[in-house]
Amino acid sequence: MFELLWLIPALPFAGFLILAPAGSKLARPLTALIGVGSVGLSAALAFAIGIGFAVSPPPGYAYSQVLWTWVSVSGFRPEIAFYLDALSLTMILVVAFVGFLIHLYSSEFMADEEGYSRFFAYMNLFVGSMLTLVLADNLLLLYLGWEGVGLCSYLLIGFWYKDPYNGYAARKAFVVTRTGDTAFSVGLFLLFTSLGTLQIQELMQRAVQQWGAGNGVAVAAAALLLGGALGKSAQLPLQTWLPDAMAGPTPVSALIHAATMVTAGVYLIARTHVLFALAPPVQAAVAIIGAATLLLAGFSALTQRDIKRVLAYSTISQIGYMFLALGVGAWSAAIFHFMTHAFFKALLFLGAGTVIISLHHEHDMFRMGGLRKQLPVTFWTFLIGALSLSALPLVTAGYYSKDLILLETWESPAGSPLLWAAGVAGALLTALYTFRMVFLTFFGEAKGTADRTPGIKMTIPLVVLAVLSVAGGFMEMPASLGNVHVFTDFMHTALPPVRSLPVLPGADLMLEIDAALAPLAGIILAYIFFLYRPRYAERLLNTTPGKLLHRFWFSGWGFDRVYDRFVVRPFLWFAGVDKDDFIDLPYSGLIRISRMINGALIRTQTGRVRWYAMGIVIGAVLALSVVVFR
Amino acid sequence: MATVPMEYGLILAGVLFALGLIGVLVRRNIIFILMSIEIMLNSAGLAFIVAGYRWAQPDGQVMYFFILAMAATEVSVGLALTLMFYNRHKTLDSDAAGRMNG
Amino acid sequence: MILLWLIIIPFLGGLLAWRSSSVNSVLPRWISLAALALDFILIIALWVQPGFVLSPPGGLMQAGGGMWIAEGNWKWVPQLGISLHLALDGLSLLLLMLTVFLGFTAVASSWTEIQERVGFFHLNLMWVLTGIIGVFLSLDLFIFYFFWELMLIPMYFLIALWGHEGRFYASVKFFIFTQVSGLLMLIAILGLYFIHGRDTGVYTFDYLQLLGASLPPAAEFWLMLGFFIAFAVKLPVVPVHTWLPDAHTEAPTAGSVVLAGLLLKTGAYGLLRFVIPLFPRAAFEFTPVAFVLAVIGIIYGAVLAFAQTDLKRLVAYTSVSHMGFVLLGIFAWNEIALQGAVMQIICHGVATGALFILAGSLQERMHTREMSRMGGLWAAVPRMGGLALFFALAALGLPGMGNFIGEFLVMLGTFRVSAAAAVIAAAGVITATVYALWMIQRVFHGPVGFKGEIPDFKGRETFTLAVMVIIIIWLGLYPRAVFTTAKPALDNLQKAVTVTETAGKQIHDGR
């Protein structure tokens, strides 16, 4: 069974290889069949392997499959090899399954678009790369998948290539994430140079053997890997690309910029958690960055008009939660939140996509409204997704995963009440901006008419994801609520549990109640401000600090401006002035000088015999006088 | 036998050479330029003979034969060129052939 | 003897192509292809020779030792110690394969572009290739210099006769740069010849005999510098790179392909084969300077590539950036970095050659290289767009393609020697991303900026570029063949350096 592991990433790649060269000649249904089918088969295979893993786990709860030796140079021997354990299994299940649903959705969503086969080719390439990333047995192969998904992100954001803004957004995404990736690659150099391998498991063992906690090299290596993770997962200070990435088609945003690729940074840190545990300062930085990001992005989400940008900031914010969890050592909680987030965020994006397409590509929430009646299925599923994102207590998956993070943030020795407070404040913000979006879009008076209702291929993914957004949480419940630990127990075969500090009896429950109240409060506030008495919100906005804050948050805390001022413009300026290459100047100068001398000498060539004879005479006189008078 | 002092001979040669040179430089007519060159060659020959006479060596006169031969060939080639020149430019003004300026 | 044939075949092929043009204008093309095919068969025959790939010959750095796949040594002017000494090891073999392969693509890419003086064009093209093959095979410095200069003249004609608007300026600039630097090398060769002769009494130009020469440090430095400058101009290294954008831009497509794909590589080959093995101590003292030049080249080339508006000029500047990696890898001088440099040489040759073919085809169709007059071409020519995208991604070092393996190994190997150089080089990858994506944006994406019909690639062009795509992917995912072929050669070079170094040390300690 496990021998078929390689097929999981290979199938989508095969789909890409068929569609990329020949796609434009194939009929659309066939294109869709290949595009959706390859991912579907891959997902089915992932399920089969998952069941096999659960029924008869391989020894040590890990299975690795070597395909061939990629490079073999003087001790540097990365292999094309896949590694399956609880962590990567969870990842491939989510990636392949959510990926399949989104492909299915896209086959209808993109039906009227030019470049249908191009779209599916890129999407297949993405899924293949993402699966390679999570299954990679060594960091170099992981890097291959890592860059591959970055590439697909670029290609798909810029899918509608005729609009230069889309191209700009696509390039921005690729360049910003590649900035982080450069740190990542330097991290690989450092790890290989000091430990002599890039095979992840071996690397972790050797790291523990050679480095104590807080070792300088370990800290440097972890910090460099973190750089890569920050870029890909859109965390401070490299988060600026994600809101712009919404220029791509909505299913792309759902798949790449919400459910899967952007969580690659989370996966990387979880995968190399041993290294991060050896570098406490870096791990603390992860937690702080996560907490700061989740708050900053939450505030920005609150001010957006574009429904997709709200979701984009929300994604940044939710990944902030995952980073917070990673930073306090709650590895399993981070992955749990990754999973539930993948369900509900994909659901929300697909719902938003349905809304957008039914309103002729209208993105502005202030021009929507009252869609509850016109798009009932979309509304109910979107509402479930929104509730899950807001972490409505007890019944949603988002609640259980967020609650687990908050609880462990408090309990972990690496955590602190301050981080916990940031998390709770973030939960309130999340509920506030989420229901602002829900109320503006679906409630109130109708401002447009939805004249395209989603068909079956778009509805099925919405419903399935809605079910998962609720049910996905029940596999992990805190002690006070049923005490189910299926997910973490499974995950602990690959990731160590949190070493909790002893908590005062009853404190658990207090924490949970606090964490449960925050979303409720957020929803109520949203109701007051955006549905019941919108005037309040307007009044708040019209004060001077309100205006300033609004503008500041709307622009994403001014990061873009700073980068533009200090990085982009100097680069452009230099490129502009040096287009003709300063270094060529001395050579051109040399040319000019020889031309000048040449010009002067040309003048002496008059073509007159007498002139030449005179020259001979003067030369002879000079030569003789030198001889005579010396 | 009264001998002419060598200096006189050399001065005569020098004067002749200067005359020829000035002729070459100032005349534009090719025939005159050729004639002036002829004078310069003969002045050089004279200087050889005077010097040979002074040292009682035959070399000076031998050299004069060479110069004579060379002058003859020079004049024949030069006159041929002059004919060609005249055919082409319908003039004997050397400045008319200024096409080889830089 | 087979090595001599490798040189003679393209030489005669060129002559034949030239004469045949009076018959028919397609004949020279087929004759050139046939000559190249014959050469290619010979090279492949050498490559698959039993026992070579599997058991790398160990061997000392002695003439007739087991280190060569094939060797031939004919006396030429014994009085002066000049012999026709040719030899082939894994390194030369890889470069020869690259040469012949790019020769094919050069002929194919000029199939419709060149319509005037077809025969003479192919004569020049084949003779450039002859010179390059000779450079990769020569083990006698005199012969090496001969072939080195032989490359220039036909290349000069290729640019000056079939180039674009500014071809005269570009061809003269190219010629003067390479000629002056070549003369410096000649002086260094003669210096080495006389110093070695004076010390040992054996006056010879033979590489293997000169290899162990122990030179006074000052002399070693100056001789090394002479060689280094010659190769640095070809490579090119930053302050002496300015001939390259002009020459690449103005040359016809085949000329650009040969320039970028092969002529630059002769510089890298020279550094690998001659500079470091002949003058190891001076070269190692020079390493910091070389590193600084390399990283400046990587960043500066990439920034200037971004700044260009002329498509071919942009691609030309990317070569400056990529060859910086090669310089870095060579001077890092450990196996990982050297293998990376070899890989980078090959993949850069293929990928940049492909980009020049694309740029040339666009120019042939649109009669402009100005990117501001392009834009939105994807809709019209999706096949060209997809291929351009692929090679742009190869240029920015996307994993899964051979260029990534090359750059990564270079940086990995350099990191041990100088972490700072590796880190700055890694930052160059970001700038590479910027120019590659900007190029795609301005040419293929964005609003349609060109009116008129542009035909997409047909079979011949698609086939040529598809083969190049396959090579890049193959080397990106399964590069073992290159490593095993190059390994014995690189091992021997490294061994030679250690031998020379210790010998030098003993002599100097003894004094």
Image: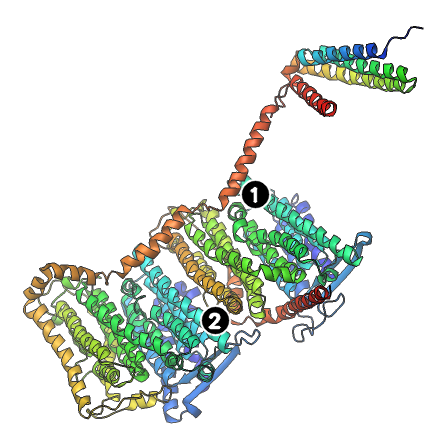
Q: How many discs appear?
A: 2
Label 2 is found on which chain of the structure?
A: A
Where residue A355 appears, x then y in whole percent? Answer: 19, 67
Q: Amino acid at mark 2?
A: Phe
Q: Nearer the viewer, residue C511 or C498?
A: C511
Q: State the scheme by which the image is colored.
A: rainbow
Say whether marks 2 and 1 touch (CB < 8 Å).
Answer: no
Res A186 → quadrant: bottom left
Of circles 2 and 1, which is in front?
Answer: 2
Quadrant the N terminus of chain C occupies: bottom right
Q: Secondary structure at mark 2?
A: helix
Pointer 2 residue: A189
One can see residue A210 in this view: yes
One can see residue C350 in this view: no
Pointer 1 residue: C173
Categorize mark 1 by other alpha carbons within 10 Å: few (<14), some (14-19), many (20+). many
Look at 69% across and 70% down and name the residue there.
C49
Where residue C50 appears, x then y in whole percent? Answer: 69, 73
Q: CA distance from mark 2 to mark 1?
A: 40 Å
Which mark, residue A261? Answer: none
Look at 39% across and 89% down and name the residue there.
A53
Q: Amino acid at mark 1?
A: Lys
Label 1 is found on which chain of the structure?
A: C
Q: Nearer the viewer, residue B14 or A558?
A: B14
Compared with residue A178, is residue A89 higher up or lower down, i.e. above or below?
below
Res A165 → quadrant: bottom left
- Most extreme residue toward the right is B1
